[in-house]
């Protein structure tokens, strides 16, 4: 299955279209695949765009490589989003693309962020992906992965997954709480960390990163599942976010207030 630039035009149709074909500037009126093919230009591909095309199907099966290629080329040529029908018949599109960052709307409840990180290993580029799914009650949970991008023995560019723990230590759920911040006037009594953990059967975290910045932010989202009474007990202790800074080798947790 493929779209856009992978549809071949009959030679007579190309001649008739000629230079009259044009690509719309709005995501709402996407050009016909034939028109896009006529107007295609050579454009340098960023590391994040190349990684997006090469992510294995097991990690991003909703969009085939040819679909991803169409989305990238259209964004490069028009600076607007190409809304494409994914393999589940939903709509996917690129929300933002910069030199070092890519964010893709996959479905109404999921997205993927791709970020190039400064990395000094010769011949290798490093990218991080953040795949986020929003479940019930708008609670989001993210999965972080890392890949190196570089040539193989045949000088073809390959994307290779690297164990995430090499670059990022998942936070302990307790890191999201400030046990000293509790207020007996709002909680009824001062809660211990054991009390909080008992109230929170599991934890979900949503991660975000901004283009041009090497700071990772994590938000605890499990509180959306809690009853109003439990939420009122827990919220006085909850840190609004945790942050990590990239030092060229690994994400290091920033000091919390």
Image (spheres, grey):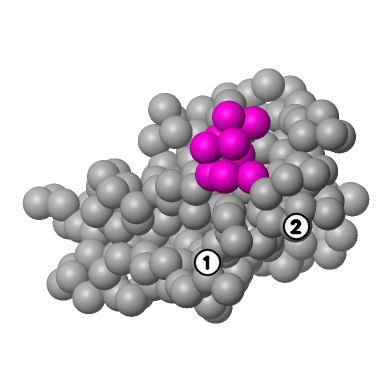
Identify residue for label 1: 243
Q: Is residue 22 left or right of residue 99?
A: right
SS of the residue under disc 2:
loop
Q: Residue at x 30, y 58 (%)?
A: 167
Q: Is residue 10 left or right of residue 162?
A: right
Q: Where in the figure is residue 123, as x and y percent of width and height?
A: 18, 68
Which residues make up the magenta segment?
191-199
Q: Residue at x 55, y 78 (%)?
A: 212
Question: From what the image shows, is residue 6 above or below residue 248?
Answer: above
Residue 115 part of the magenta segment? no
Local crowd size for mark 1, using a 10 Å CA cut-off: few (<14), some (14–19), many (≥20)? some
Residue 64 in view here: no
- Find residue 183 and name its label: 2
Q: Is residue 89 left or right of residue 5?
A: right
Q: Where in the figure is residue 37, as x and y percent of width and height?
A: 65, 51
Looking at the rendered structure, the number of numbered marks drawn on it comes to 2
The residue nearer to you, when weighing 179 against 26, is 179
Residue 197 placement: quadrant: top right
The residue nearer to you, when weighing 97 against 43, is 97
- Find residue 168 and name its label: none
Q: Is residue 122 left or right of residue 170?
A: left
Q: Where in the figure is residue 148, as x and y percent of width and height?
A: 28, 55
């Amino acid at each position: 299955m493929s779209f856009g630039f992978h549809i071949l035009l009959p030679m007579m149709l190309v001649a008739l279209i000629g230079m009259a074909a044009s690509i719309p500037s709005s995501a709402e009126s996407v050009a016909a695949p034939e028109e896009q093919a006529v107007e295609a230009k050579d454009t340098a591909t960023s590391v994040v765009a190349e990684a997006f095309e090469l992510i294995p199907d097991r990690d991003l099966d909703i969009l085939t490589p040819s679909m991803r290629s169409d989305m990238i080329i259209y964004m490069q040529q028009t600076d607007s989003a190409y809304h494409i029908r994914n393999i589940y018949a939903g709509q996917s599109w690129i929300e933002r693309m910069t030199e070092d960052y890519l964010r893709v709307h996959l479905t109404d409840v999921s997205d993927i962020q791709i970020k190039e990180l400064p990395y000094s290993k010769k011949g290798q580029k490093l990218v991080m992906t953040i795949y986020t799914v929003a479940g019930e009650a708008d609670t989001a949970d993210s999965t972080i992965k890392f890949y190196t991008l570089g040539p193989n023995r045949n000088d073809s560019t390959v994307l290779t997954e690297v164990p995430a723990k090499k670059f990022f230590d998942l936070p302990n759920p307790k890191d999201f709480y400030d046990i000293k911040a509790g207020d007996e006037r709002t909680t009824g009594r001062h809660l211990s960390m054991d009390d909080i953990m008992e109230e929170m059967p599991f934890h979900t975290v949503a991660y975000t990163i901004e283009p041009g910045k090497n700071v990772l932010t994590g938000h605890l989202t499990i509180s959306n599942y809690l009853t109003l009474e439990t939420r009122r007990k827990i919220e006085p202790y909850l840190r609004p976010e945790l942050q990590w800074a990239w030092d060229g080798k690994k994400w290091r947790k920033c000091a919390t207030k």
